[in-house]
Every structure is written in C-alpha cells, then in structure tokens.
Amino acid sequence: MFRKTKTCHQLNLYTNSYNQFSGRALKIYNDDKEWHNQFREEILELIDEDIFRPLFADDFGSPNSSIRVLVSMIILKDAHGLSDSQLHNNCLFHAQFRSALGLHNNDDPIPVPATYYNFRKRIVDWERSGNDNLLERVFKQVTKSQFIYYKVSGKKARMDIKLIGSNIAKLSRYELVHEALRMVYKSSKLKISKLLSKDDLVFLKDLFSQSCFNITYHSSDSEIDTKLQQLGIVIYKILKHFPGKLTEQLQTLQEIFWQQFEVIEDAVSVLPKEKLLPGRVDSPHDPDCRFRKKGKQSLSGYYINVTETCDPDNDLNLITSVIVEPANVPDQDFFQPACEATEEVTNQKIETNSSDGAYYCQDNFNYCVDNEIDHIMSGISSSVSGFDISVNDDGTLLVVDTLTDEVIPSKIVKTKSVDAEPKWSICVGGKKKYFTQKSVDACQAAKLAATRSKEELNLRNNVEATIFQLGYHYRGNKTRYRGIIKHKLWAFARCIWINFRRIMKYMGSIRPDCVQNMIKCADSAQFFVFNSIIAFLLLFEIQNLQTQRKMFEMG
C-alpha cells in the first residue's frame, strides 16, 4: 500500500546520533557544508514520492518503506561506486550515510535488501511494460527545482556522447547462437523435447555437455561451421512449432536466428559475414546490447548522451538531459531529443548549442534553423576532404581542389529512381569520385565551422570532464549492469550526483568564513536558549513535585 514518508521525524533522547559524537567528529557531523547534510536538503527532501505511486496499491497490502530513502539509496550506490552489500553496510553503520538518508537515530530502520531489490525490480518492470523511466522523472523534477532556486541560465548548452559496454563477455557467432539456444533449452526442456527428434535431442545433449568456449577452442573452423548449421536447423524447428506464447528468452533466440540465418523454402543456411547487418544482438544475456561498426571501429554496448548548460555568465552549470540508447543508434539521432529535454527542464529556450561534428545532419541543421538555435560544431567529418564543393543555380556541381585551386569538371550521375537525391562524379588521377547532396551539405557546414572563433569552439571542451565523471567508477568503459533500463537507472543516478556535487562546490564558494561564523553563533545562541528553556521546565517540575510531596505529608 502506498504511503508517503513522514516529514516530521523525532529525535530519540538516548539513541540520536548527535549524542554519539564529540569534538571534531560532532563538528563535522553538524557542518552544513558536509555532503551528508547538503544531500539531505538538495536531493532527499526534493524527491516527489507521488511519481512512484503506480508501483503500489492504494487501498490494501503492507505500507511501503520510505520511497525517498529507497531512491536516495539507488543514487548513493552509483554515486560512490558501491556494491549492494557495501551500500547496505554503509546505510547500517556509516553515520554520514544515515544522516544523508534522514536517519538521525541509531535505531531508525533502513529498508532490508529484499525491499531494495524489489523496489528496483518494480521500476524496471514498469518501464519494460511500456511506461516511462521513473528515475528519469525524479531527475527532471529535482533538476527543475535546482534551476529555479539557483537561477541557472539554460540559454547556452553543450552535449557529448559516451560509449559504455555492458557487463557481458564478447562472443563469436557460434558462441552467440550456442548460448542463446542453451538458455532456452534449460528453461523449456520439456516442451522442446516434444518438438525434436531423438537424433536432435542427442545432438543437443552432447553439445550442451560442454561450454561454448570449450567447443570453439577444440574445434576447427570447418567443424564450427558445421555445428552452426546444425544449430540453425534445430532452432528453426523449435521456433516453428513452439506451443503458446514465446518467452523473453525465446524472443531473443528468434531475433538472433533471423540475424544469423536465412530460410529459403524451409531450408536453413548460415548468412555470409558480408550480409550481417549492424544493430544485431551481441549477447543473449543482454539482448538490449547492440553491435555497430563506426568507420573501422567495432562498437558494442550503449550510448549515453549528456547535455549540460554552459553559459559563461553562470557560476553554476548543471546537467539537463541524459539519454541512453543501444550502440547502433547514430550520434545525430540524440540531438533533437536532447534539446527538447533541456528546454523542458530549464523552461528556457536554447539559443546556442555546442557539440562536435558527429551530431551534424541535414535534419538537425533544419531543426536549428526552425528553432533559431545557433549550432556551434567542431571537427565535422566529411568525405570531401581536399575539395571545396558547392551547387550552382543550374544544378551543376562546382568542385575546386583546395591545394591547387583548380576547378575540376563534374558530371551529373543518372539515378534509377526519379525521387533519388542528386549525385555527381569527377575524375581525379584516372579514378572516379562521387558526391551526393549529403556531401555538399557537410562541406558547407565544415566551412561554417571554420569561421567560428576559438572562444566559441572551446565552449564545448569542458563537457569532456562531465563525460569523465559519468563513468568515473568504471575503468575499461564497462558497467556492472545488463539491460538498457538498468543502464538508465545508473546514468540518471550518476547525473543527479554530479549536479549535487556542483551545487556543493558552488555553495562553498559563496559562503565566506564570516557568514559561517554568524551561522555558528546563531546555532550556539539557539542551543543556549534551548538549554535555558529545558532547565526552567525541569526546575518548575522539581518544585511542583516538592509541593505535592509536602501536601501529601501534611495531609
């Protein structure tokens, strides 16, 4: 049953943490500048618990644990790069962690591990069923409050992207298919045994008696090709006749099968390597993880796009948008959603956006023109290096060699489709070179970027530090998670923490020592008044008891 956290929390006279410290330890524990006290004010108390109301029943069941504490535990775990056991130990015994969670009494309970795991699972299942990410809503809600309170300008923004790998082993084609079928066979052995012949079952039993790594190590290339073909035939039989609704593992197997095999008139064959498409599943243990080739690089994992403010007039700049997608999504697809998410959080219109050339495409260029955004780009990749190209009014292509200033004649290439984009060709050194409208647009964008001042281009550079902080705890660019939803939870938790640390730094810079001394003096005065009141009440109670005792003795 959904229940909000009580806002008023009473200190216990005997078990409150303030009585457990003295001297320097008490001074640090009470210091408003320490991270635990600021986290409680800047993050914990700002979390809107109604966001998580759909995860719980309204009228029956046991009341939930404090949602603010559970969400804060998720943030603190990835903020400090802790394991689950380290997180729970810190929440039990670490005074600063407990203070950050608003637990000032030593006997205040924390959610047990099962409650914590179940809460995370509910968030994942909620998004998996087609809803939005609830931690993303927390990130937006908290960041909106911070933008309003600290009056941060969102007119200038910058963005960058980071590839981060999933917590999976790299598999060959055979290992991928073998492991996907093994997982399905293990979970649905009874159903599968009814679909296959005895020979197929003997083949699978012999095959799964060894790991896929052992088989590839002890087999030749021709033997691997034969076994891969046999696996394809068996998988096709299972998928074709499997009764009932496909499970999640069977859906992954089906996706892998159609990416690695082809079927012509019920005859299964292995796809040649040159026909393999990008964006294919990279591991059955993480079906959201995708493979992609970028130039000569082979990429696998997830892209995380981070957008932040960068107005030079700001003393405080915050992250405004985090987008996580599989690695097969091109960089330019992040640009427009990131701009829209930034304007939603800041409630301000973006006037300038700084990024590298990977975000360039004609759609993004038109989007910036329509929305009056000055898009400052650097390092635009283009296939027209060495040439300056432009289109004349009559539709011909003007090609100039940038080294010799020689004008090279061009020809329009006939296309099969009438609606196809125009295409031109030139002959250089006896070889033909082709240009498309995309090449022309990229050349124009590169020339525009060359006119930018050094100060404008350098405005983007500091976003690299944000990207570094995002993946600070993960060397080798690999997380401990699997699945895109869990990677989203990690990314939002990290970015909430990065914004919090920036606010801490900002608050420390605007608090001179004299202000701190005034605060301490005020605290001391309040403490003196509080003690005086307590002493007066105790004296009054003692006198009252003495009067009652005398009356009792006289009576």
Image: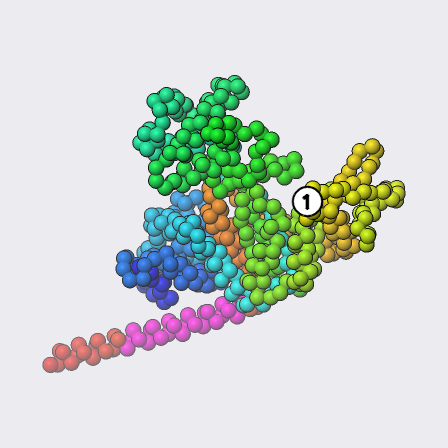
Q: How many marks?
A: 1
Quarter of the image containing the N terminus? Answer: bottom left
- Which secondary structure, mark 1? loop
- Residue at image position (44%, 52%) is 130
Chief SS of the magenta region: helix
- Horizontal relation, residue 72 to residue 294: left or right: left
Pick the front one: 367 or 11: 367
- Horizontal relation, residue 372 to residue 204: left or right: right
Where's residue 266, x and y in %? 46, 29
Query: Against 459, is 383 above or below?
Result: above
- Inspect the magenta stretch and tell me whether residue 536 lies in it: yes
Quarter of the image containing the C terminus? Answer: bottom left
- Residue at image position (63%, 49%) is 332
**One can see residue 411 in this view:** yes
Give the image quarter of residue 366: bottom right
- The amino acid on which the numbered mark 1 sits, given as a three-letter code, is Ser
Question: Magenta stretch?
Answer: 516-540
- Residue at image position (46%, 42%) is 482
Where's residue 170, x and y in %? 52, 32
Pick the front one: 413 or 177: 413
Where's residue 393, x and y in %? 81, 54
Query: Against 54, is 220 above or below?
Result: above
Query: Against 389, is 106 above or below?
Result: below
Which residue, given by chain and number where applicable, does mark 1 sit on? 417
**One can see residue 103 in this view:** no
- Residue at image position (83%, 47%) is 398
